[in-house]
Each structure stands twice: as C-alpha cells, then as structure tokens.
Image: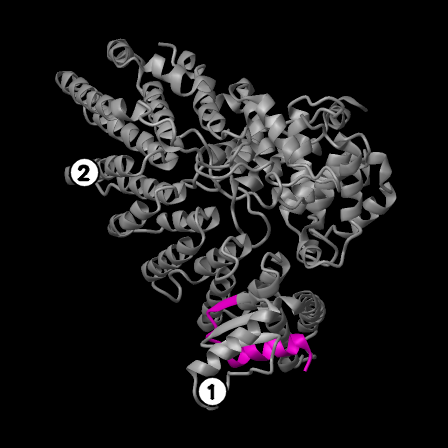
Amino acid sequence: MAELAVDKHVKYILAVEKNKDSFESVVMDHLRMNGAYWGLTALDLLGKLDSVNVDEVISWILKCQHESGGFSGNIGHDPHILYTLSAVQVLALFNKLDVLDIDKVATYITGLQNEDGSFSGDMWGEVDTRFSYIAICCLSILCCLGKINVEKAVSYILSCKNLDGGFGCTPGGESHAGQIFCCVGALALTGSLHYVDKDLLGWWLCERQVKSGGLNGRPEKLPDVCYSWWVLSSLIMIDRVHWIDKEKLVKFILDCQDVENGGISDRPDDAVDVYHTYFGVAGLSLLNYPGLKAIDPAYALPVDVVNRIFFSG
Amino acid sequence: MDLLNQLETILESDPLIDEVGLIHPSQFITLSKECSESSNSSADGAFRPANTKFWNRDHKLGISTEILLPVCKAAKSAFMDAMEQYKTHSDLSVNKHEDKNMVYPSSSCQSFESEVMKHSRALLLLSCDLGTAWNARKLVVSKKQQLPMFTDELHLSALVLSYSHKSEQAWSHRRWVIKMIAGKYSNLQQIIAKESELVEKIAERSKMNYRAWNHRCWLVSYMTREQMLYELKKSRDWAGLHVADNSCFHYRRRLMLGISENKQGDDPSYDVENYQVVKEELDLNEALIKRYIGREALWLHRRFLSLCLIRHWMTTTDGISCHSTSMANEINIFLDKELCLLDPCSTIQDMEFEDFEAQAIYSTMYFLWLIKQIPEFRKIELQEKLKAGNLKNILHKTCPERSFLWDVLEL
C-alpha cells in the first residue's frame, strides 16, 4: 500500500498560498480564511506548522476583523460566522488567542442567536445548523459558552433530527454527513450526546461506506475524501467507529494522493485542492495513521492544541 | 470598450437574459455559422459575429473562457471600489442628517447605488459565491423597498443558478428576498408554486442537488395542506423517473410529515387521508423496487414509509385495550407482506450483476432496520418469523461486513 507523502503535501500546501493568478484562486479569494484554517491545520497535523511565518498570518487575520467583532474571509469582505471560527481556530493553532478581544468576538456570535435557539450566519439572517456548531465551537474555544442560551441552542439542533437518525440544515432538511458532523459536534461540546440514538445514527453513518472503502455524504452518492472527516469524526463522537472498515478507508484516502506533486483530491485521479488535502490528512489522523498528530473530532483542532486551551494557565 | 464594460452593456441592453454559460473560443465560430444559417437577414441586431468574447442571442449569454480571469478581476475591483464609495457616502449622509442645516444631494447617492448594483451583477455572474457582493445588493434593495427591485434579485439569482446549480449564496439570496416580500407585496402561495417549479427545473439538469432540494424543503413550512398534497402529486412522476435521487424522496417525506402534522381540529377524515397518502406511497415504492433493482434511495424511502405506517397503527389504537389485538394483527399482516417482498430480493439471482447483489444487501438491511425500530414487545413473535425467514444467514452471506448489526438488534 502507498504511504502518505508527507513532504510532498507540505510543499503543496505552502505553494497553494503563492499561486494567486489562476481563475480558481480569484474566485476562492473571498474564503481565504477557511483556506488558511485547512492548510495550517493540515500542516500542524503533519508536524510542519513551523514552516510558516506566524506574524504575517496573525497580522493578516486581525486585518480581517470588523467593528462588529466578526471576521471576514479576506480583507475588504463582509464578516460571517464561518470565517470567524476559522480565524479563532488558526489563532488557537499558533497559541495566539491572547491577541483577541474575546468579549468582542463573543458579542458578535451571541448576537447571531435567534429566539428559537438557532443561529444566523451573519446579519442577513440565513439559518443553518452549521452555524449552531460554529457558534458553540467558537465560544467553547474562547471559554465563554455560557454567553449564549445553550439549552435553546441544543433544542433547535434536536428539532433538525430526522427519522433516519441524521440531521439536516433546518427542521425537515435532508440528512447530510456534513450537517450531522455539525450537529453531533455541537451536542458533544455541550454535553448533550445522550439525546442521540447512537445505534440509529451510527447505522446511517456506517452505510456511507461504499465498496471502494471511501465514504459518501448521502445515499447514492460517490465517495469523497472530505467525508472521511465528517462521517468518521461523527462515528467517533458517538462511539461507533468500529462499525466501518478502517483499513479500507485508509487505503481509499491514500489512493487519492497526488504522489508526484502533493495534495489530496476528492476521489482517485481527480485534481487536488487544499480542502481535500486537509480532510484527507485529518481523516488519517482520526484513523491513527502513524506519524500524524491526533486531531480532536469535535473541535477539529489537534488534540495538543485543545489541551493547551483547557489545561494550561 | 473594455471587457467589463462590454459585459455590463449586454446585461443592461438585454434584461431578459435567462441563461449564462461559458464558451470555448473555438465554439464562437461554430455558433456564428449556425446563426448565419438560421437567420437570413441582418435585421437581427444581437448577432455579432465579430465578437469572440461574448455571445448574446435569444436571451442567452455566453462568455468566452479566454477572458474569464481578466473580466472577473476587473469586475471585482470595480465592485470593491464602488462599494467603498457607497459606504463612505452613506456614512457621510448619516452624519449630515444629524446636521439639519445641510442637505445632501440624493442624486449622487443614487449613482453610487447603481454602480454597486451594476458591478455586483457582473461580478456574481463570474464568481457566484462571493457573499459580499450578494450582501451589497441586499443592502441597497432593502433601503429601497420596491417590488421591482426584489423581483430583479430573484431574476439574477435564477440566472446564476442557471449555470451554477449549487451556488449556496444564490439559493440563500432567494430565501432572503422571499422573506422580505412575502405577505407584503406578493401572494405567498404563488411565490411558493413558482419556487417549486424552479427547483424542479434545476434538479432536472443537476442530479442529487442538495442545495436545490433543501430550498424546496424549506418552502414546505409555508405551504397549506392543499398545496402539500398537490406538490406530492406533482413530484410523483419525477420521483419515478429519478429513482436514485434521495433528495427528491426526502422532499416527499418532508411533504408527508407536513401533511400528517397539519391537523385543523379533530377532523378524523384527515387521519384517513394521512394514512392513505402513506399507503399509496408504499405501493408506488414497491412497484419501483421491483422495476429498478438495487437502488439504495428506494429502500431507504421504504424504511421511512413502513415506520410511519407502524407508528400510525400504534398511535391510532394506543390506550384502547380492545383494539390492541387489531393493532398486533395489522402489524403482523404487514410484516408478513414485507417478508414476502424480502424473499426474492435477498436471494442473489445473478452474481454477474452488481444490481442483484445491491438489492440483496439493501433489502436485508431494510428489514433489520425495521426490526430495530419496532418496540420491544413485538420482538418475541417476530423472532419466530425471522427464524423461518432465515434472515441472519442472509445477512452473513450478503453483507458480512455489516453482520455486527445483528447484535445491535439484541434479539
């Protein structure tokens, strides 16, 4: 079986940042904050976070913060909860949470909670269980979860549960592995996993594994490396990870590598990108692949980073 | 004229453009030839064979892949500049308002607004998930509160969706507009009907599109019972033609749940109708399962339908002791029927075709799942049936990797 091409992937991630003149990079420019989180977390898991200039990253992140406390995907764009979590996560990676005015960020997030407990992504009001996870994860990292109404937040998430055990974006929305990760993650972080029928949800999740060993995100879909993260982390959180064939999944992820130029794609032989590179590496980390740092399935941050937040100082 | 200007001029001169696409430079020649054959006069002003950057005819817009990067960059920088000016100006006018002696010319404000609208439109056609550009439009439109402007937004969003079917921002923008105009300007029921049609049109071209169907599911919470029943009827044929599209079946599940939850008073005729709806769907599902071998979405749909039916029997007869035997009977008859369906499905008729193998796996898993969902007290009797049905052996044979699920059932 092929091995993880660690050095190639590190080189690829560092190069992505420099390539700014393709159409793809121009249309992705507005979510650079997410890109930074994917790339830098992958680097950290690979043990190579020291190859980036910390000060450069931090000063750029701070330029993306708005008066409201929220962060945008890049300088000059509007703030959104999606980028706010990525900014906080990257600062946590570098042990630089102290540069933040924590109250200000917390006020932004708290202000996005709606009467029914749900969260809007920004001032324009789109509601999604992804935003519930983000709010809860972000405030947990900042150690001020008590600033929102946790009880209502949990009950909204539970209202998005389907008869198949999965979760959707809003009540009645179709189950989707990405949404399930968000809901299970939020429930885990709030100590509410006892509301989940673990066998029923685990059943749905383990049925995502297809013949090739890869995981899909919904029934009848092709496997995709990113679900190695969404499905696997959910299975770990509900203690059902032994319900899938881990060896086959490791092989599937390794088959999606570009062993020559680095990077991981969604499926074997497709074009690589930083998003799938991160999720591939993170998936392998969850599968205890040798040489990788362990990642926390709920915080989506390396375990040592999470420990540092809660057990130091 | 620079590229951005050209694009914006086309968009302004033809507001009815309803489809955008990318064209490879070599396709311009083919398109020109086709057009000179079909249109025999020079009366058609939209026909510009000399232009190999943009194609605009019959309210369709084609953009050359060659100019994508420069025009996208130009649009972005023009939009960012316009937005900057617009914001500075709005800040100023807010401050000036406080100073009552000053009157700020509203015309300049309008020109900034129209710049923002013009450039964001061009930009979004090229980079559809740029939230900041959608937000800028929301800002301008919400200040104006005019119905034609809201309608324009629905049009632009549909235009973006015509080539980028999964654009989360474009779908989200629609929901924002609908929430703004619902009840105020337009008939909500009419909007819902139109939206539902749009999703169907897009779903036809983009299979298993989560965002599109999610939008349709969102509409359900605004529907009347009649509308839900109508939608269920309307999407029936589509579902039959797209048996792998789990999203469409989920939409039907959403409608059925909506119908069953929608009870005005204690009208018992609703219960009968709800039961009928599920029963009919179950019959349709069985027909499809037999016609299309090995479709996961169909078997998952059946899990839901069977569970609904069993729950229906349990709630309608709950607490009335003389009825509990009839409930047990109903469930027993149902399970017998399901076992009959399972029997031929779970035998792999032909090893050469994966479909039969898949059918065996899905049917076995379906039945196991159902057992899990049936309350404890039914299990003893069921176990007898299962012995006869030899389900455990089938499970080990068809999907040994899921054999552990047998233990989950705790039989």
Give the image location of residue B337, x and y in percent. Answer: 20, 24
What amino acid is found at the position of numbered circle 1 in the picture? Asp
Picture quarter with the N terminus of chain B: bottom right
Against B320, residue B148 (above or below) is: below
Residue at horizontal 76%, vertical 37%? A9
State left or right for residue A207 relative to residue B387.
right
- Sooner in the amino-acid sequence: mark 2 or mark 1: 1
Q: Which mark is residue A189?
A: none
Element carrying mark 2? helix
| Marked residue chain, label 2 | B
Give the image location of residue A183, x and y in percent. Answer: 53, 33
Q: Magenta segment range? A: B1-20
Give the image location of residue A65, x and y in percent. Answer: 74, 50
Q: Which mark is residue B276?
A: 2
Same chain for mark 2 and mark 1? The answer is yes
Residue under label 1: B44
Whether residue A105 is visible: yes
